[in-house]
């Protein structure tokens, strides 16, 4: 009853405070200087909605009239709210006022706009560009990629499974240079067996997950061999944080450790499905707050472990193996943008999906699940590594088609902050 009285008073005294609309948007995308607000898509609409305060209890809202999507209660709007279930809900209009959700200003710096400039409306080109194919001064020009890294100067590093080497392409270069390996398959310090991940620090030092030899190698710039920093480890993914610490996923112990301290930063409670456990961790990503995002392979989910966390937060998947929008199938790669939106390389479904914070499902952004044509660059087929450069372009290692695809980012729909 108090609630109704409040609404009436609000409506009588401040009639000018009205909901503002979200156009051309996606569910829950940011729309206000209040970060607790987001767009709720109107029932029956696909990309138009209202900007609302989101954190009301689901139980406070009733379902809309099923046949005509209207609300019998006054001052309610019928919206889609998947976090509260599949049925459209009558959401109180008072939660959409500009008092609760002031509009974002486009003239001042928008605090919710991440510094990578990626926003909810960002898109990626459907067709990829094949990159990193030619190698200079080498016996073999064949490149069969198995892992990728792109540095801050846009140089591309590829682990070439065919020739057991790492090749570097400077930004814009058509020919790459061999920077490590190239001496065949083996476990000598200038050889590799099965490279699954590479990262390169600001000094050009490469860290290489040589999974086949169960070791992590450090290869200094211009050196002719590596030294082993960790052995007896079934590494898969590597990541560096902004202080130069290295993070390694270890499938033998279902954990992620940080080197050189060797502390466990995710998992480490034996194999399992509980939130403090992992089951075959694969690629990893570390954000600028040092939160660790882990591809938790056989749990078909991506988990985020903030610094000091005792358990992970599921940020994608976790609904069993499958093709559904809320599911993943043998995920292999993950990156996150500065707003915490997660991008998942879904090996079994041959797609990359984008998961907004707290979203129950992902949105397909790359790939054409169920279709393969090696001449079609919109297709990824059994892909095992993915990275995002500082601009937001995505690179996918497409192993069955033996190529590396770059998908250009398009941020033109984002609000300009200056
Ligand atoms: C919505 O998107 C379409 C196509 O991308 C564009 O033509 C139109 O101008 C957009 N409308 C608004 C209000 O941004
Ligand atoms: C919508 O449907 C409900 C019953 O489901 C009905 O009571 C109501 O009058 C309808 N509203 C409109 C505007 O048709
Ligand atoms: C790069 O080299 C400098 C000088 O040797 C050293 O102080 C620094 O720690 C190195 N940075 C990284 C990330 O290893
Ligand atoms: C971490 O592990 C490596 C390899 O086992 C070892 O050389 C190093 O000393 C360890 N670091 C610490 C801080 O214990």
Image (cartoon, rainbow, N blue to C red):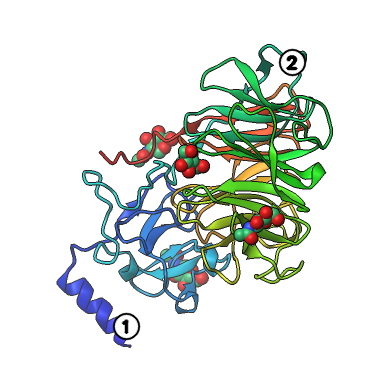
Where the N terminus falls, by quadrant?
Answer: bottom left
The reply to whether residue 110 is visible in this rendering is yes
Question: Percent position (x, y) of residue 124?
Answer: 52, 34
Disc 2 Cβ-to-ligand 3 distance below 8 Å: no
- Label 1 sits on residue: 3
Tag in front: 2 or 1: 2
* 119 in relation to 136, above or below: below
- Which residue corresponds to the image point at 22% horizontal and 74% vertical from the top-left? 10
> Measuring 28% from the left and 66% from the top, which residue is drawn there?
100
Instruction: Rate crowding at label 1 as few (under 14), some (14 to 19) or many (20 or more) other CA atoms within 10 Å.
Output: few
Please identify the residue farthest to the left as the structure is shown: 13
Image label count: 2
- Which residue corresponds to mark 2? 141
Compared to 389, does 360 lie above or below?
below
* Depth order, front residue of 191/84: 191
Q: CA distance from mark 2 to mark 1?
A: 71 Å
**Picture quadrant of residue 298:** bottom right
Q: Nearer the viewer, residue 18 or 292?
A: 292
Q: Please give the name of the residue rendered at 49% of the width and 33% of the height, measured from the top-left corner.
A: 409
In the image: residue 38, left or right of residue 87: left
Query: Which quadrant is the C terminus positioned in?
Result: top left
Q: Is residue 315 visible?
A: no
Mark 1 falls on what kind of element?
A: helix
Which quadrant of the structure image shows residue 216? top right
Horizontal and vertical percent position of residue 284: 62, 50
Q: Alpha-carbon neighbours of circle 2 within 10 Å: few (<14), some, or many (≥20)?
A: some
Q: Is residue 169 above or below residue 250?
A: above
Q: Earlier in the sequence, mark 2 or mark 1?
A: 1
Quadrant field for ligand 1: top left
Identify the secondary structure beneath mark 2: loop
In percent of width and height, residue 49 lies at 41, 54
Query: Residue at the spot x=32%, y=83% of the render?
Result: 3
């Amino acid at each position: 009853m108090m609630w109704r009285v409040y609404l009436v008073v609000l409506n009588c005294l401040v009639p000018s405070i009205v909901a503002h609309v979200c156009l051309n948007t996606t569910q829950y995308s940011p729309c206000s200087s209040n970060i607790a607000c987001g767009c709720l898509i109107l029932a029956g609409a696909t990309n138009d909605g209202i900007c609302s305060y989101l954190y009301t209890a689901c139980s406070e809202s009733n379902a809309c009239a099923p046949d005509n999507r209207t609300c019998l209660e006054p001052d309610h709007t019928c919206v889609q709210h998947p976090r509260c279930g599949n049925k459209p809900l009558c959401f109180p209009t008072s939660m959409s006022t500009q008092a609760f959700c002031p509009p974002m200003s486009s003239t001042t710096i928008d605090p919710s706009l991440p510094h990578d400039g990626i926003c909810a409306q960002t898109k990626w080109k459907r067709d990829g560009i094949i990159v990193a194919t030619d190698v200079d001064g080498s016996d073999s020009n064949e490149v069969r990629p198995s892992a990728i890294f792109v540095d801050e100067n846009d140089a591309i590093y590829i682990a070439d499974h065919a020739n057991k080497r790492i090749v570097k392409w400077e930004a814009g270069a058509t020919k790459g240079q061999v920077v490590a390996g190239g001496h065949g398959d083996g476990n000598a310090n200038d050889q590799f067996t099965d490279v699954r991940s590479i990262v390169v620090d600001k000094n050009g030092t490469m860290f290489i997950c040589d999974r086949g030899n169960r070791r992590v190698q450090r290869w200094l710039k211009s050196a002719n061999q590596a030294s082993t920093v960790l052995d007896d480890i079934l590494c898969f993914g590597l990541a560096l944080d902004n202080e130069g610490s290295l993070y390694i996923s270890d499938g033998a112990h279902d954990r992620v450790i940080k080197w050189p301290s060797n502390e466990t930063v995710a998992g480490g409670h034996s194999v399992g499905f509980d939130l403090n456990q992992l089951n075959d961790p694969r690629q990893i990503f570390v954000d600028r707050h040092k939160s660790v995002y882990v591809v938790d392979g056989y749990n078909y989910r991506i988990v985020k472990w903030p610094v000091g966390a005792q358990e992970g937060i599921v940020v994608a998947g976790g609904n069993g193996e499958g093709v559904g929008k809320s599911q993943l199938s043998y995920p292999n790669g993950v990156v996150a943008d500065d707003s915490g939106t997660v991008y998942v390389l879904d090996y079994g479904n041959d797609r990359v999906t984008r998961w907004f914070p707290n979203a129950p499902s992902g949105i397909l952004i790359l790939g054409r699940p169920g279709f393969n044509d090696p001449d079609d660059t919109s297709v990824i087929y059994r892909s095992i590594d993915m990275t995002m450069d500082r601009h937001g372009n995505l690179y996918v290692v497409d192993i069955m088609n033996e190529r590396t695809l770059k998908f250009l980012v398009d941020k033109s729909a984002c609000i300009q902050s200056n």
